[in-house]
Image (tube, rainbow, N blue to C red):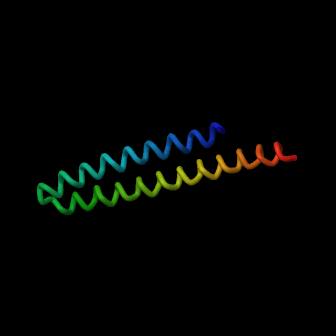
């Protein structure tokens, strides 16, 4: 797999970790009835999840492109 695809996987993992941290923060603030701060953390978690999905899709695209070229070469 290309270094670029691997980097996208690493970035996706980082964003998932950030999202998880913000979800835990949101839960703690929600339990403390601090709903405004809970909402902020939940929204931030959603943003990180969105970025993680983007990086995962980019990695998958590169993976398909890489293996698609090999499959064509093997069949030629």
Instruction: Judge by depth and name the residue closer to the eye, 11 or 61.
Output: 61
- Expressed as whole percent of the image width and height from the top left, the position of residue 13 reads 45, 43
Who's the residue at 81% across and 48% down the image?
72
**Which residue occupies 67% across, 50% down?**
64
| Residue 74 shown left or right of residue 49 in the figure | right
Tally the numbered discs. Answer: 0
Asked whether, in this view, residue 3 is left or right of residue 75, the answer is left
Name the image quarter holding the N terminus. Answer: top right
> Going 18% across and 62% down the picture, which residue do you hit?
35
Can you give x and y, in whole percent of width and height, for residue 61 in the image? 63, 52
Say left or right for 16 vs 72: left
Q: Nearer the viewer, residue 12 or 69?
A: 69
- Name the image quarter holding residue 45: bottom left
* Rendering coords of residue 67 (x, y %): 71, 45
* Horizontal and vertical percent position of residue 55: 53, 50
Q: Residue furthest right?
A: 76
Seen from this angle, which residue lies furthest left? 32
Above or below: residue 27 compared with residue 3: below
Q: Residue at x 17, y 58 (%)?
A: 30
């Amino acid at each position: 797999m290309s270094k670029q695809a691997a980097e996208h996987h690493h970035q996706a993992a980082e964003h998932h970790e950030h999202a998880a941290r913000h979800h835990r923060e949101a839960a703690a603030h929600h339990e403390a009835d601090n709903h405004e701060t809970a909402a902020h953390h939940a929204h931030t978690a959603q943003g990180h999840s969105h970025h993680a999905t983007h990086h995962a899709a980019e990695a998958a695209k590169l993976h398909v492109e890489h293996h698609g070229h090999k499959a064509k070469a093997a069949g030629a």
